[in-house]
Image: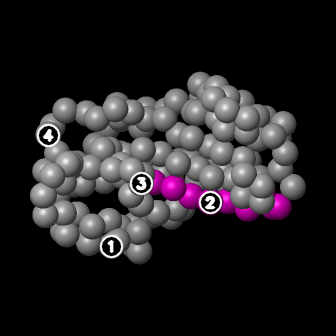
Amino acid sequence: MVTREDLESFLIRMDMDWSEVDEGMFLMQSPSGGVVVHLSDPVLLVRLKVMDLPNGEADLAELYRTLLELNATDIVHGAYGIEDGELILTDTLELQNLDFEELQASVESLQFAASSHLGRIKDLAGADDGRTEGEDGGE
């Protein structure tokens, strides 16, 4: 079973800037934005904010369809989801057998998906060309 100390060791090995923002919750800074890693026994939650969704009456059916298709075909670890008006990528890993390589693969998969899908997602959402909070990676 991975402990908090094990997780800290994994984060150090990933060679990214990180800080503990709450007990068992870590914020990793990456070119794709902040990745939150939360130790919540018996799982580790990994989350990355992709963008704020537009407010208003915009028809987002095509965006939602595309996100579901990407979940099914193009995301190795995790899935897109919506929470509090934000589009997020999230993955859940079991602590029982978690190792460094699995955590690293999950984080890299989320970062890759965010950077490679962002342009298409923003177009479908009708978002402006400016970066939203937490985004400074390539498209």
Q: Tell me the CA gap for discs 1 and 4.
A: 23 Å
Does 43 appear above or below 64? Answer: above
Tell which tag, 3 or 1, sits nearer the viewer: 3
| Foreground label between 1 and 2 | 2
Frontmost residue, 126 versus 71 = 126
> Is residue 63 depicted above or below 87 in this figure?
below
Q: Residues within 10 Å of mark 3 (few under 14, many from 20)?
A: few
Tell me the element at label 3: strand
Labelled disc at residue 83: 3
Q: Horizontal placement of 33 versus 94: left or right?
A: left
Given contact means CB atoms under 8 Å apart, are the residues at marks 1 and 4 in contact?
Answer: no
Which mark lies nearer to you, 1 or 4? 4
The kind of residue tagged 3 is Glu
Residue 22 image offset from top left, x and y in percent? 67, 32
Where does the magenta region start and end? 89-98
Q: Of the residues shown, which amino acid type is indicated by label 2?
A: Thr
How far apart in space, not on screen, are marks 3 and 2 (Cα)? Answer: 16 Å
Quick check: 123 left or right of 53?
A: left
Kind of residue at disc 4:
Asp
Q: Tell which circle, 3 or 4, labels the residue nearer the N-terminal end.
A: 3
Would you say residue 116 is visible in this rendering?
Answer: no
Identify which amino acid the numbered label 1 is placed on: Glu
* Secondary structure that dominates the magenta span: strand
The nearer-to-camera label among 3 and 2 is 3
Residue ID at (72%, 52%): 40
Which residue is disc 4 drawn over? 128
CA–CA distance in space, label 3 to label 1: 19 Å
Disc sitting over residue 92 in the figure: 2
